[in-house]
Amino acid sequence: NSSNRSIDIVFFLVWRNTYLLKLVHHHQRLYIKYEYGVFNNIKELNEYRFKDYLKKITLQGKIEIVREEGYTIPPRINTLEIDSDSPIMANNIPDSIDTLHFGMGFNKPLYALSTNLSLTSLSLGHYFNTEILPGDLPVSLKTLIFDGCTFGRKLRAHISFSNWQFYGSSYNKPFQKGALPPSLTHLELSEDYNHPFKEGDLPPGLLVLAFGKFDQPIKLNQLPNSLQYLKFGPLWNHPLSYYNLLSMSKKSILPNSLTHLDLSYCKFDQVLSNGDIPSTLKCLKLPKNYNKPLL
């Protein structure tokens, strides 16, 4: 009897573990299959059978977010895409949302987002062209992306986010003094941006700088001493150093902090000589047709 009881216990433990393992795998598959959904309104979202598995949703159509009585966005959802031009009302984006994307049709003021202290990433779509005023964006924001925007407003001094990207944007306005926050570490400029920088315009802690069709020469001390990654676009073709006739010496425009320089996409054909490239550089990418001697 004791032996039979031991066998029964072992069988039960094996069966239970097998059952639990199958249950875990079943829910894992559901999380993967139903982590994203598209809905017309909050009511439709709340009536969705698998809403508890969602992490990212798109709300589309002419809707007012979280306005239907008794309906909310489930707390597990952290990424929200709004594919409409409905205005954003105060407190209608829940605190669980840390990533917010606006679709191509959205073009409304953003001041209602200032209270969303969990928001870390904001992406604005093609037709967004509403002025962004100081105080409109939450202090928690780390990444601001203009994704293909026709945005043409002047950018004023804003909050201390660290990542600013202009993917496919046509933005071509000079930055006003203080518009680039001191905390900015990652700056990717639009394809059309082509304004010269003065010494001190770029934040002192900038690590990554990528240009589009920028064709302005870089002068001494314009690039911050913190810069590690620098990429130029297709039109750039200027010397990497300047010769001082008074001191009879040559000095590179590149900071000694630079580790990666990407010239592979531009028409760069300047001769590279001793002193042009800082000793800290680990990766240098040149155009495929570059045929100048390295002196």
Image (cartoon, rainbow, N blue to C red):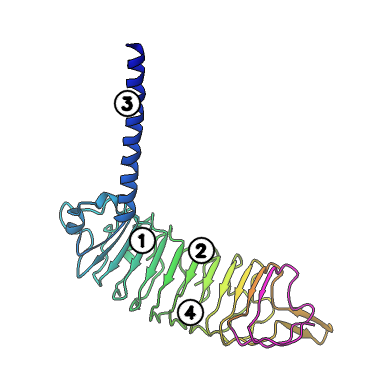
Residue 84's tag is none
Span colored in magenta: 266-295
From the image, tell me which residue sits under label 3: 12
Pick whichever of labels 1 and 3 is earlier in the sequence.
3
Regarding residue 265, the answer to whether it shows in the image is: yes
Identity of the amino acid at label 1? Ser
Q: Residue at x 78, y 77 (%)?
A: 275
Mark in front: 2 vs 1: 2
From the image, tell me which residue sits under label 2: 162
Regarding residue 96, the answer to whether it shows in the image is: no
- Residue nearest the observer in this picture, 136 or 3: 3
User: Between marks 4 and 1, how big is the CA–CA gap?
Assistant: 25 Å
Residue 114's tag is 1
Identity of the amino acid at label 2? Ser
Mark in front: 1 vs 3: 3
Q: Is residue 270 magenta?
A: yes
User: Between marks 1 and 3, how big is the CA–CA gap?
Assistant: 55 Å
Pick whichever of labels 3 and 2 is earlier in the sequence.
3
- In this view, 116 is above or below 216: above
**Numbered disc 4: secondary structure:** loop
- Residue nearest the observer in this picture, 264 or 46: 264
> Do callouts 3 and 2 mark residues in contact (Cβ within 8 Å)?
no
User: Between marks 2 and 1, how big is the CA–CA gap?
Assistant: 17 Å
Q: Quadrant of the N terminus?
A: top left
**Numbered disc 3: secondary structure:** helix
From the image, tell me which residue sits under label 4: 190
Q: Residue at x 54, y 67 (%)?
A: 186
Pick whichever of labels 4 and 1 is earlier in the sequence.
1
- In this view, 146 is above or below 291: above
User: Between marks 4 and 3, how big is the CA–CA gap?
Assistant: 63 Å
- In this view, 201 is above or below 194: above
